[in-house]
Amino acid sequence: MMKTKAQHAVLFALALVAGAAQAQQANDPFEPANRAIFGFNEALDKAVLTPVAKGYQAVVPELMRQGVTNFFGNFGDGWSAINNVLQGKGEAAATMVARVATNTLFGIGGIFDVASDLGMERSSEDFGQTLGRWGMPAGPYIVWPLLGPSTGRDTLGRPLDLAWSPSLAINDGGVNIGLSALNLIDTRANLLEASRVVDGLAFDKYTFIRDAYIARRRNLVYDGNPPELPEDKEPAEPATAPAPVPK
């Protein structure tokens, strides 16, 4: 199983490389500030998040870690269902509702991903994607402390994305803080292999992640079929003057 995770990490990193190649010109007017915040996030990740995630991965059995991932994924599927509705994707919305119902009822609150075994594919959507679907431009690239890469559009959608959490169903501050911490640690642990590959591939990690993030978000908004960028279009051939009529 660990070998499979490593292979997925490599594929993830290569997908980022491909995405970076597509993001021809990043809209990054705040690059100096973004780089400073990126450096802070990297230092925090190296000093705190990565060691904790490695410890979590070493101590917690894989089956339990997968159950944690499934639990938070099932909760996120509910938000994806709502965003599919907002985007007018009726079939995807119905599938996501069925996923949540199936995993909640038969997967013991989402700990087991029964829906995927039954062929119900996940169609993840967030409010930033919904705003993009409604025609809002991505806006400038922004790096936020702790939250990481974003754009102007994704920043507007992030509060609603963050608000959709188990705290909606659990009215206990201490439990909610613990669940948020567990979600963060579990997410970071799932990305350990991918981050190792990216560290080995990227000469300028900031630029690599920025371009990959922008390309990936654009790809998600257009469901994997984004329109051609202006700089990708072949220049029109110059019009030729008509040949002179011989006298």
Image (cartoon, rainbow, N blue to C red):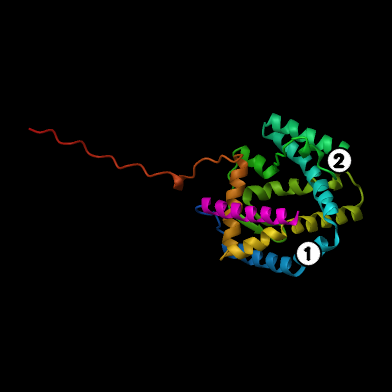
Query: Which residue: 80% across, 50% down?
Result: 69
Residue 241 quadrant: top left
Residue 115 seen in the current view = yes
Query: Which residue: 75% across, 65% down?
Result: 50
Which numbered marker is on residue 107? 2
Residue 53 on image: x %, y %: 78, 62
Which amino acid type is shown beneath numbered disc 1? Lys
On screen, residue 69 versus residue 84, left or right, reads right
Magenta region, residue range:
1-23
Magenta span dominant secondary structure: helix
Using a 10 Å C-alpha cutoff, classify the residue at mark 2 as few (fewer than 14 neighbours), some (14 to 19) or many (20 or more): some
Q: Secondary structure at mark 1?
A: helix
Say if 234 sits above or below 60 in the image.
above
Which amino acid type is shown beneath numbered disc 2? Gly
Say if 152 sits above or below 193 in the image.
above
Using a 10 Å C-alpha cutoff, classify the residue at mark 1 as few (fewer than 14 neighbours), some (14 to 19) or many (20 or more): some
Query: Which residue: 61% across, 58% down?
Result: 209
Q: Secondary structure at mark 2?
A: loop
Residue 188 on image: x %, y %: 75, 58
Residue 162 on image: x %, y %: 76, 49
